[in-house]
Amino acid sequence: MKKTIKLLALLAMGAALAFAACGSNSKVEGQGDGAAAAEWVDLGLPSGLLWAKCNLGATNPEEYGDYYAWGETDTKEVYFWETYKYCTAVDEEGWVKTLSKYNTDSEYGTPDHLTTLQPSDDVATAKLGNGARMPTETEWNELLDNTTSEWTTVNGVYGRKLTAANGKSLFFPAAGDRDGSELHVAGEYGRYWSSSLDAGDPYMARYFHIGTWNYPAYVDNDHRFSGFSVRAVRASQN
């Protein structure tokens, strides 16, 4: 009888620990732990670059995943200049005054002339390792130049499907973005960071934009504090 009671107590403790562990892994707007992004797709690109099948923080291609400010490696509750890692001062309107890293303009402090995220600031590298990283602006454009684009749905989720000549494809859900504490335009647009700074306006970084059928995919710039999706890449191991 004592053995039975002890076994039941151990099982209950194990269940409680498992529940606590699941709870501790939850993320802001997250859907999964990012492990599925270790599955890579070879689109036959000229560079040989492999692209992750899912967004960082997602377990299926249609899931939104997590949102990150540019150069930050953790999710958070509020996305604005006051909460941005590399903003060291704001003006009376809450606009960035000085940047502590990735700065090409003395207007925003002492320039360091870094224009590409270092591995320590690359969330794809931090979460996945093994050579994973965020794509550069050039690599996003290579993807666009070597695929056809279609606005479609996967399991009821809107997004854009990019298909290469070898028949392989990637689905980018219209995950919206996080500004302040809110999730915006999910289901209508998707914004995916590159690792490239906008050198002319260092408070901005380059990103990949998708939208509805009449808004083709393209690369643009936006404020570094914004919470955008991340899709990882890595070099081919062939």
Image (cartoon, helix red, strand yellow):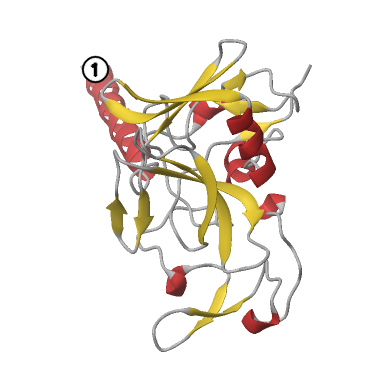
Work out whether residue 122 can be spotted: no
Q: Nearer the viewer, residue 231 or 161?
A: 161
Residue 135: image location, x then y, percent: 64, 41
Q: Is residue 86 above or below residue 176?
A: below
Q: Quadrant of residue 157?
A: top left
Q: Nearer the viewer, residue 112 or 169?
A: 169
Q: Quadrant of residue 45?
A: top right
**Tag 1 secondary structure:** helix
Q: Residue furthest right?
A: 238
Q: Is residue 51 above or below residue 181?
A: above
Q: Which residue is mark 1?
A: 4
For the C terminus, the quadrant is top right
Residue type, numbered disc 1: Thr
> Disc count in the image?
1
- Report the residue at 30% width, 52% height from top: 183
Q: Nearer the viewer, residue 61 or 28?
A: 61
- Report the residue at 40% width, 38% height from top: 65
